[in-house]
Image (cartoon, rainbow, N blue to C red):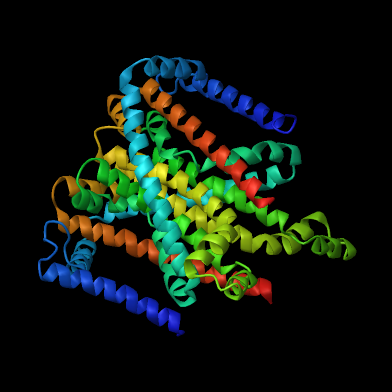
Amino acid sequence: MNIESVLRALLVAGFIGLIELLCRTHVIPQSVLIAPSQMLTHLVSVVSAGVYGKDILFSFTNIAVAALLAIVSGFLVGLAVHSMPRLRAALEPLLASYYAVPTFIFYPVFIVVFGVGHGSIIAIAVLLAVVAMITATLTGLDRIPGVLRKSAAVMRMSRLQTAWRIELPAALPYLFGGVKLAVAYAFIGVIASEFILSGSGIGYAIAFAYNNFESDNMYALMLLVLISVTLINAALNYFDRRLQARRQR
Amino acid sequence: MLRILPTFLLVVALIAAWQGLHLVIGAGALTSPWMTVSHLVSMMATGDLWSNVGATAKAFVYAMGLALIGGIVLGVLLGVNRLAGAVAEPILLNLYAIPKVTLYPLVLLCFGLGLSSKVAFGVMHGLIPILLFTMNAIRQMRPVYLRTAGTLRLTPIQSLVHVLLPAILPEVVAGVRLGFALTLLGVLIGEMFASQRGLGYMAVNAMGLGDIPTIMAVALLITIIAVTCNSLMLMLDKKLQHR
């Protein structure tokens, strides 16, 4: 444990402790925020009773499918675009402006096309996540040192061998950066779409609890989202650091 | 001129694809490009659209101002103090990845319906990228700049104005470009849930009514504004990088 992680843990713990204290002493009224310990105990009781099992499953299925689709299609599109420099030159300004457009505005159109349910939510999440993967694939392929391809030629590797043994491992750290972004965007896309219009899912359940003043359920689910995002991020960062370390070796 | 020709052709191809999609799934689901433009023009003739554009613009200007000032000030502080930066960075990255819509009930309870919660939403989305870019710019700045400022016995304010800020400007502009897009997204999402006015409210209202032409017209308008602003900032970005 280095000093930074200790300080960081203290900072987070202190912040949570402060909120706990303010809630327990009713400086923050119960109607605005419930104490973090209550959120956690309520979350445990709700999850173990299986009340939101269906919603949680719905959201995580959507996130997993959307992230997978975005990663695979983003990688394939990235490969194809990279092999066509003229198309790429034309596409690049559009890619640079892509995230300036609030994609959620197209959600209603998808609802009309796919109906309310898995299809429209996954479509909007893929739309949000795929461009990050395309950009990361392009960067990764650009950054493969020329000398690696030359050594592959010296060793008389076939095209397939070069791709599998040289190019893929060399581009992997950049590709993984794209994977990280794609997962984060898939998360945001799914939860936000469920908020806007959906019949189930964690986002829908939070909006439902909010509209019905069930603040204990609402905060328990919000905590669930925060915890799962943090855990998934931590896991992805761990793999990322290992990949980066391997590259520097 | 020759450089933008391929992009222009690609945009034309995209519009053709839009038209094709419209023909496949029908006007009830997706209006054609021409219908969307003409609907947008007819909406522009009414005052209703402009009052909503004004509401969004007002919230966006406030949010962008706060995100810009807060992001740069905090970014400089965390960049200069290495320990504080190292402690804060993973927390900030995690906050950045959280779907912030999740927190919207909390924002509503704190700020109420209307302008202030829209602004809060915009700041929540836009502040962190500007902060992270500024912090990293200061960390990666060549140490000789600061040593020169020390040799010249500049006061902290002088070295901030004459050395630090000019040195980090290109990265800050890149951060602001990202922050701009996310602040706009934040304001629009805020309007979708927490407002009775603005373009986001118009879109979500049209969604409730199943009014596809209006949704498409609003989406087109927002896309045009966002892409134009982004292209302008990209040009500024390139100019600064080549300095």
> Is A89 rendered above or below residue A232?
above
Residue at image x 56%, y 45%? A131
Say whether residue A151 is left or right of residue B81.
Answer: right
Residue at image x 43%, y 30%? B219
Q: On the image, which quarter does residue A95 sit in?
A: top right
> Is A58 rendered above or below residue A111?
below
Q: On the image, which quarter does residue A19 sit in?
A: bottom left
> Is B27 rendered above or below residue B172?
above
Front in this rendered view, residue B8 or A137: B8
Residue at image x 30%, y 43%? B118
Q: On the image, which quarter does residue B150 sit in?
A: bottom right
Front in this rendered view, residue A99 or A176: A99
Q: Answer whether residue A61 is visible to the viewer in this image.
A: no
Q: Could you tell me residue B178's position as x and y percent?
A: 50, 49
Q: Answer whether residue B133 is visible to the viewer in this image.
A: yes
Q: Could you tell me residue A199's position as x and y percent?
A: 27, 41
Q: Residue furthest front?
A: B153
Q: Could you tell me residue A142's position as x and y percent?
A: 72, 54
Numbered circles on residues, count: 0
> Is A36 rendered above or below residue A158?
below
Image quadrant occupied by the N terminus of chain A: bottom left
Q: Could you tell me residue A56's position as x and y percent?
A: 31, 55
Front in this rendered view, residue B212 or A160: B212
Image quadrant occupied by the C terminus of chain A: bottom right
